Image (spheres, rainbow, N blue to C red):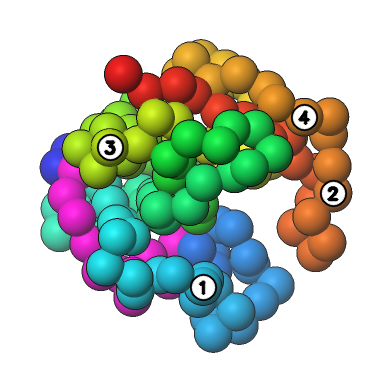
Amino acid sequence: MLIRKIKSIDTLSLRQEILRPRSEVSECLYEGDDDNTTAHFGAVQNDTIVGIISVYNRSNPIICSDHGFQLRAMATASNVRGRGIGLKLLEAAENYAEQNNSNYIWANSRTVAIGFYKKAGYTIESQEFEIKGVGPHYLVRKRLA
């Protein structure tokens, strides 16, 4: 399994399939996808992208005034789940944020994924809230070195 940087366009298939199955591909494009400070990572197996994560240079003043990065659009194909791919993608995003002088990394975690983030050392920073059309979430954060 290889984790490597990919282009934003390479994330769209999994974003739609896993995260937004009732949406058009065009609705899976996010503001900031092509900013020069944004990075996208893919888990590649047999020349196929089976996992994705995007990380944006975006602080969250609700939880911290320091320089932060936001995680978005993390997904793994259903046939490869449970193999540690998500943790490897998360590590790549965290390393990228650290290399870019971030003090913390944060995400709006789907409620069903909260155990994954806790296992990876993230803390819950909010009560559960709803993102319209997507479902229940928690704000999570991890301090970086």
Marks 4 and 3, the one that precedes in the sequence:
3
Please provide percent x and percent y for residue 42. Answer: 27, 52
What is the spatial separation of the Cα atoms under label 2 and label 4, in whole angstroms?
12 Å
Where does label 3 land, which residue?
101
Where does label 4 land, which residue?
126
- Label 4 or label 3, whichever lies nearer to me, is 3
- Dividing the picture into quarters, in which one does residue 144 lie? top left
Mark 3, other Cα within 10 Å: few <14 / some 14–19 / many ≥20: some
What is the spatial separation of the Cα atoms under label 3 and label 1, in whole angstroms?
22 Å
Please provide percent x and percent y for residue 98. Answer: 27, 33
Please provide percent x and percent y for residue 78. Answer: 48, 46
Three-letter amino acid code at disc 1? Answer: Glu
What is the spatial separation of the Cα atoms under label 2 and label 1, in whole angstroms?
20 Å
What is the spatial separation of the Cα atoms under label 4 and label 3, in whole angstroms?
25 Å
Three-letter amino acid code at disc 4? Answer: Ser
Mark 4, other Cα within 10 Å: few <14 / some 14–19 / many ≥20: few
- Label 2 or label 4, whichever lies nearer to me, is 4
Q: Quadrant of the C terminus?
A: top left
Marks 4 and 1, the one that precedes in the sequence:
1
Q: Is residue 22 above or below residue 74?
A: below
Mark 2, other Cα within 10 Å: few <14 / some 14–19 / many ≥20: few
Three-letter amino acid code at disc 2? Answer: Glu
Where does label 2 land, which residue?
130
Where does label 1 land, which residue?
31
Q: Which residues are magenta?
A: 3-14
- Label 3 or label 2, whichever lies nearer to me, is 3
Labelled pair 2, 4 in contact (Cβ < 8 Å): no
Residue 5 among those drawn in magenta: yes
Q: Is residue 38 above or below residue 91?
A: below
